[in-house]
Amino acid sequence: IPQDNVAWLGDAGQLFDLSQAAIPNSGEALNLRIHPDDLALRLKLLKDHFAGLAGYDVEYRVRLGNGQFSWVHDRGRVE
C-alpha cells in the first residue's frame, strides 16, 4: 500500500484494548502487534491480493494492550 494506511470499521480501541491514540493506523504498526507465527501468512496474502491473485481474508493473533493475544478475522480490499 503506497500510503501504508489502515482503516478500521467499528471500535478498534475496544478490539485492541488500547486508547484511540495507540491504535495501529499503518500496516507497519499493525505488523508489530501480530503474533510472529502469523505474520508471514498475513504478508503473503496481502502481497497476493495487491497482485490481483486473490481476495484478502485471513485470521491471525494480535497482541492486546494487556500483552495477551487474541484472534481476529481481517478482510479488506484495495481501492
Image (cartoon, rainbow, N blue to C red):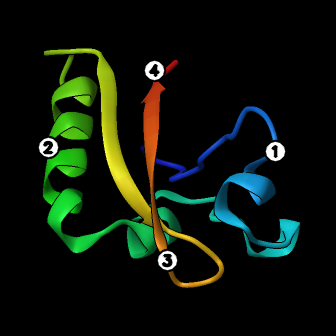
Which residue in the structure is indicated by mark 2?
A: 44
Mark 2 or mark 1: whose residue is earlier in sequence? 1
How far apart marks 2 and 1 lie (CA) works out to 26 Å
Callouts 4 and 1 close, C-beta under 8 Å: no
Which x, y percent locates residue 8? 69, 40
Please indicate whether residue 42 sits to the left or right of residue 20 in the image: left
For residue 68, which numbered disc appears in the image? 3
Q: Give me the residue at 49% from left, 63% from top.
A: 30
Callouts 3 and 2 close, C-beta under 8 Å: no
Q: Secondary structure at mark 2?
A: helix
How far apart marks 3 and 2 lie (CA) works out to 24 Å
Q: Secondary structure at mark 1?
A: loop
Q: Give me the residue at 65% from left, 62% from top.
A: 16
Mark 4 or mark 3: whose residue is earlier in sequence? 3
Which x, y percent locates residue 78? 46, 23
Vertical arrangement, residue 78 with respect to residue 73, above or below: above
Vertical arrangement, residue 48 with respect to residue 53, above or below: below
In this rendering, which labeled residue sits more in front, label 4 or label 1?
A: 1
In this rendering, which labeled residue sits more in front, label 3 or label 2?
A: 3
How far apart marks 4 and 3 lie (CA) works out to 28 Å
Q: Secondary structure at mark 4?
A: loop
Which x, y percent locates residue 60? 33, 49
Please indicate whether residue 76 sits to the left or right of residue 66 in the image: left
Q: Secondary structure at mark 3?
A: loop
Place residue 75 in its image quadrant.
top left
Which residue in the structure is indicated by mark 1?
A: 11
Which residue in the structure is indicated by mark 4?
A: 77
